Amino acid sequence: MADSEHVLVVGGGLEIPRLLREHRPGTRTSVLCQLPLLPKLQQPGAHERVLALGARCSAREWVEAAQLVDKADPITRVVTFGERDQDMAAAVGVALGLPGHDPATVAAVHNKDRMRRTLRSAGVEYVLARVVNSSEELRGWLVDHPGSWVVKPLDGSGSAGVGVITDPDRSAAAYRRCVGSTHTGRSGSASVLVEEFLHGVQISVESFSEHGEHLVVAVTRKFSDPATLVELGHVLPADLPEAVLAAAADHTRRVLTALGVRDGPCHTELVLTEVGPRTIETHLRLAGDEIPYLVRDATGVDLVDLAVRHTFGEPVLPDARRRLSEPHGPVQAIWFGTAPCTGTLTRVDGLDEARANGSHVQLAVAVGDEVRRLSDSASRPLWARADGPDAEAAVRRAREAVARCALVVSVSAGLADDVGAGT
């Protein structure tokens, strides 16, 4: 058994553990994750073992659990494919002497204040930001610095807890929303980040790194809700001048280098401001929102496949470059639908009509599930994918498909005041 691969997947990984086993037959996979992820594991019986820990378990306990597995069946690779518990995966990698992200890199990427300070000290960019520890401190900052500010959790993702604020009288509500959100699944922090609102086109850069070399695979144009900053749609390739795309790619490489990224996929979100690209945040993982599949269909580069092969130490950048040099597919877009109010989903009308124009329409919820008004990425119950000869046409087709769908929601008396218009 020692001659074959045994991959410890920290977190869930969705379909990727299955792809690992298929890519290299004989590979064994084990999972180490938080308890809430157990119901989301795909094919749990295909793993050699599944270990789940509670939210209050320390890094030492995670390491000891991994060492217990390693003692019974030596682990050859430690990987993680999501945001949650990347810090624990890094700690396990160090303890077992296996390659992975440096814990300092994970900390710099996850903690938004540390990311800002790292990029500033490296001379990459400067974005005005301040950590506040109470709603009163937030209010004081807003009073002293009039204008538009973004309030976000220090360690958030999926736009959870994020909001744009201009009115000091709304600071208490914004602060409560922030401290109630964390992507780690562990206890939240009383500290939140308030940073200047960056004006300009929003994009994301999908990249893959090997030994510190960063290959930009695609640039995606983002469309976000102005109040919550939750993403409502994406289109790629972004319809932007070549000089702008080149500047975004160069800036992304500088960001990743400054943060110490060496290997694997990254999803970096930028705003194209008047003074150049500025970072919203970056992630040591593939993008969500179906973006890897948009990339595959638009460019021919399968980022999921790159992640699978990279897990086993196979070089992937030469093949990715070759595919990028070949003719590309049509422009790809995705658009998300939102619920009109908080309540129970009764039915969805118009799905067949929406799918009749060639769009791929997918529900993220089922009849009987609770839906809620737009607040984070998890509150988008519907999405549609479409392609087109250009970005405008692809986005229009995706939006039209969403518009053909109507979510019928049953609202209880206690939620009746939450009724509003969906997107």
Image (spheres, rainbow, N blue to C red):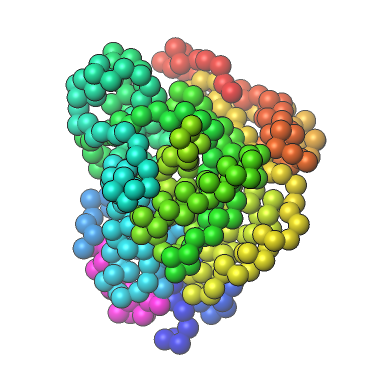
From the top left corner, tell me how far across and down residue 389 is, in percent: 78, 41
Determine whether 291 is above or below 421 in the image.
below
Quadrant in the rendering for residue 171: top left
From the top left corner, tell me how far across and down residue 202 is, in percent: 52, 35
Residue at the location (38% across, 21% down)? 148
Choose between 167 and 305: the one closer to the eye: 167
Is residue 249 left or right of 237 when viewed as pictured? Answer: left
Residue at the location (34% across, 39% down)? 126
Choose between 386 and 325: the one closer to the eye: 325
User: What count of labels does the image hold?
Assistant: 0
**Residue 271 can be seen in this image:** no
Determine whether 422 is above or below 85 in the image.
above
Residue at the location (53% across, 55% down)? 207
Determine whether 357 is above or below 373 in the image.
below
Is residue 233 left or right of 10 when viewed as pictured? Answer: right
**Residue 194 can be seen in this image:** yes
- Indicate whether residue 64 is drawn in magenta: yes
Quadrant in the rendering for residue 94: bottom left
From the top left corner, tell me how far across and down residue 417 is, in percent: 44, 12
Q: Main secondary structure of the magenta part?
A: helix
From the top left corner, tell me how far across and down residue 217 is, in percent: 59, 55
The residue segment tinted magenta is 61-76
Q: State the quadrant of the N terminus.
A: bottom left
Is residue 39 left or right of 168 when viewed as pictured? Answer: right
Residue at the location (75% across, 34% down)? 393
Quadrant in the rendering for residue 394: top right
Q: State the quadrant of the C terminus.
A: top right
- Indicate whether residue 133 is drawn in magenta: no
